[in-house]
Image: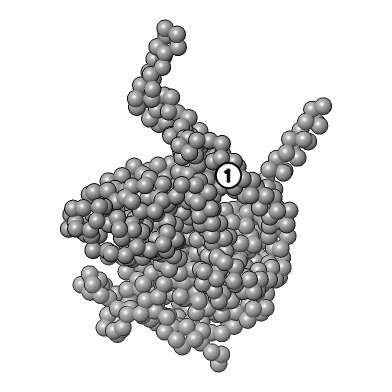
């Protein structure tokens, strides 16, 4: 990367931090824009981690919600303060875990446990290809969800009751910094020798193997790293929601993330980030008005009622799938050079016209 | 007598009731160019796949510089349905994935070109350096392997220069003309530092002029990189011109072997290729 681009990137990053600080200062803390930013950051991380697997390695996995659940639970279980445990685990005599760890240790443990489980599941599951892998991972995610709701495990997971009172974040800066750091690591990995190997596996498995790339090892690596960051994302989501329940990590969540990845473009990190902010903003904020009845003067606007938002959303998705199959970014990245050349070309075109 | 590089012993590959390769034994010695020819569907590519670990042979053994690479015997369901020969000779199972075999020093190209089509020419060759690099995913991610990475890139650039592909290094591999894609595939195979190169129909789809150039090119890389080359080919001009010895395969069985002259005058080979008239 050119030196100029590094400087511009750093400046943009600082500008983003500054913008967040300013927004927090002037908007009321409950404003929807801040919630969108927080959730958008977390979904970006999870979407990029899914893209690493689906877009860059070509493994079509649908287990993301399961790994997020493991991450969220690991974080929550490990960080609830000892003093609060009695009230949280009220049906299980305060649970059996009587210690708590700092936030960052909790997040790290969330990622590591998700990665460990991914490794175990990967042993049988990664022998499968395409749709079969998707079905197997989807099934696994559902099993995990049921497992965490099991009463017998209540002393650890609190059964089907909520986990709450663990440390959360109040500032938007926290998820932003953690998620951008994680995404930066993923980007570094993608551009390393291992990233190239993943890419080769996506392009042609047989040729990759003939080039000396150990398929099993590299697929497992990609699966574990993707799950690690999904686990961290799950932990952050738990912090964002302030209370979690296994019930909410349904397969619908995986589909949401898959949607973000597809809209952003398979194989594009920046695409996934842009798409997740767009997705969260429109589903939580911009399209909200579709759900409430509205009357202008005496005229009652037709169709607007609870649930209509989802109809519009589905139509948008269909339009994207039909007309922009490669998503917003295709497999390109949003780059400073790209923008520069875009503006240069724009200038040239204008010159020609005049 | 030069050293033996590749030894294939009694290799049989049976799919269900079909014996694709039937009791094939052959040898390739150091520095030789050996060709494997035969009509369509004779089992040539299957034989290659058994050597490179894509398939586990039903029976037989493959060794490389005296070291065993692959060995198998009919087991499981095959025990009952095996119809090949030498069923009791081998008692060990040694199966290796293709990447291990590449690491041992056998590189191959494919009949239908298999480049990483969305990657650049440079990256295509660079991939081959991955397996021998001293690194793990953490050192690679956090750029602690920059010396290794630099070495990989330099070696790749050097190879591209030697193969006169350096001016195309930033082109997307899938958008290159067919002939160049073929050459790139060979360059990529060379980048794995092989001792033995297996070429699967390198001249497929080439015109006579290109075929002639290819013949020259194959000889040249053998001398430059001190390779042994084992080649499957249909173009008889090419085969007769460059190979030291030939093996002829028909319906999975070894039909004949010898020098180009011997093969050209072998009645069985002529019959296999041209067919025998019914009332002869």
Residue nearest the viewer, comparing A302 with A166:
A166
What residue is drawn where x is 72% and y is 68%?
B161
Please determine whether, in this image, residue A202 is positioned above or below residue A170: below
Residue nearest the viewer, comparing A20 with B151:
A20
- Considering the numbered disc 1 on the image, is that residue within a helix, a strand or a loop? helix
Position of A214 with respect to A18 (left or right) is: left
What residue is drawn where x is 66% and y is 53%?
A10
Q: Would residue B1 be visible to someone looking at this image? A: yes
Please determine whether, in this image, residue A309 is positioned above or below residue A198: above
- Which quadrant holds residue B127? bottom right
Spot occupied by residue B244 in the image (x, y as percentages of width and height)? 58, 79
Q: Chain ID for label 1?
A: A
Binning the other alpha carbons within 10 Å of mark 1 as few (below 14), some (14 to 19) or many (20 upward) gives some
What residue is drawn where x is 56% and y is 90%?
B2
Identify the coloring. Answer: one colour
Please determine whether, in this image, residue A172 is positioned above or below residue A304: below
Spot occupied by residue A29 in the image (x, y as percentages of width and height)? 48, 38
What residue is drawn where x is 38% and y is 25%?
A291
Quarter containing the N terminus of chain A: bottom right
Tag 1 residue: A21
């Amino acid at each position: 990367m050119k030196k100029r681009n590094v400087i511009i990137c750093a400046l943009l990053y600082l500008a983003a931090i500054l913008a967040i600080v300013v927004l927090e200062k002037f908007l009321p803390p409950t404003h929807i824009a801040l919630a969108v930013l927080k959730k958008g950051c977390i979904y970006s991380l999870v979407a990029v981690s899914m893209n690493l697997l689906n877009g860059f390695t070509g493994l079509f996995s649908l287990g993301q919600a399961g790994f997020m659940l493991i991450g969220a639970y690991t974080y929550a279980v490990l960080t609830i303060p000892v003093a609060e445990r009695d009230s949280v685990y009220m049906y299980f005599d305060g649970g059996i875990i009587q210690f708590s760890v700092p936030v960052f240790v909790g997040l790290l443990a969330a990622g590591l446990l998700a990665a460990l489980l991914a490794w175990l599941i990967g042993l049988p599951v990664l022998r499968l290809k395409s749709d079969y892998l998707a079905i197997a991972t989807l099934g696994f995610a559902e099993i995990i969800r049921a497992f965490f709701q099991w009463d017998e495990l209540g002393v650890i997971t609190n059964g089907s009751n909520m986990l709450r009172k663990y440390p959360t974040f109040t500032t938007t800066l926290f998820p932003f910094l953690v998620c951008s750091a994680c995404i930066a690591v993923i980007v570094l990995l993608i551009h390393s020798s291992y990233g190239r190997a993943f890419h080769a596996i996506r392009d042609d498995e047989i040729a990759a193997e003939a080039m000396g790339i150990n398929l099993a090892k590299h697929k497992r690596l990609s699966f574990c790293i993707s799950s690690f960051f999904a686990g961290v994302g799950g932990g952050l989501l738990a912090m964002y929601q302030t209370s979690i329940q296994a019930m909410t990590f349904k397969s619908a969540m995986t589909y949401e993330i898959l949607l973000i990845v597809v809209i952003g473009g398979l194989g594009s990190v920046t695409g996934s980030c842009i798409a997740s902010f767009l997705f969260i903003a429109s589903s939580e904020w911009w399209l909200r008005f579709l759900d409430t009845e509205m009357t202008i003067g005496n005229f009652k606007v037709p169709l607007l009622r609870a649930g209509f938002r989802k109809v519009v959303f589905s139509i948008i998705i269909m339009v994207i799938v039909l007309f922009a199959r490669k998503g917003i970014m295709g497999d390109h990245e949003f780059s400073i050079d790209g923008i520069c050349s875009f503006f240069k070309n724009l200038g040239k075109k204008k010159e020609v016209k005049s | 007598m030069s050293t033996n590089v590749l030894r294939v012993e009694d290799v049989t590959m049976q799919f269900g009731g079909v014996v694709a390769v039937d009791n094939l034994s052959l040898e390739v010695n150091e520095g030789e160019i050996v060709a494997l020819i035969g009509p369509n569907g004779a089992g040539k590519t299957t034989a290659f796949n058994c050597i490179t670990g894509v398939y586990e042979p039903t029976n037989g053994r493959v060794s490389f510089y005296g070291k065993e690479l692959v060995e198998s015997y009919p087991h499981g369901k095959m025990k009952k349905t095996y119809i090949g020969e030498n069923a009791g000779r081998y008692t060990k199972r040694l199966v290796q994935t293709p990447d291990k075999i590449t690491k041992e020093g056998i590189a191959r190209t494919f009949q239908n070109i298999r480049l990483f089509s969305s990657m650049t020419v440079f990256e295509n060759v660079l991939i081959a350096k991955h397996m021998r690099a001293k690194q793990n995913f953490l050192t690679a991610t956090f750029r602690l392997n920059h010396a290794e990475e630099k070495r990989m890139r330099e070696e790749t650039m050097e190879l591209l220069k030697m193969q006169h592909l350096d001016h195309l290094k930033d082109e997307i591999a899938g958008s290159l003309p067919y002939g160049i894609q073929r050459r790139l595939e060979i360059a990529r195979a060379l980048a794995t530092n092989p001792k033995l190169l297996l070429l699967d129909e390198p001249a497929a789809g080439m015109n006579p002029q290109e075929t002639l150039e290819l013949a020259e090119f194959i000889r040249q890389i053998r001398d430059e990189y001190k390779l042994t080359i084992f080649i499957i080919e249909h173009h008889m001009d090419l085969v007769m011109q460059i190979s030291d010895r030939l093996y002829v395969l028909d319906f999975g069985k070894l039909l004949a072997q010898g020098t180009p002259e011997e093969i050209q005058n072998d009645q069985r080979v002529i019959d296999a290729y041209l067919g025998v008239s019914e009332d002869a």
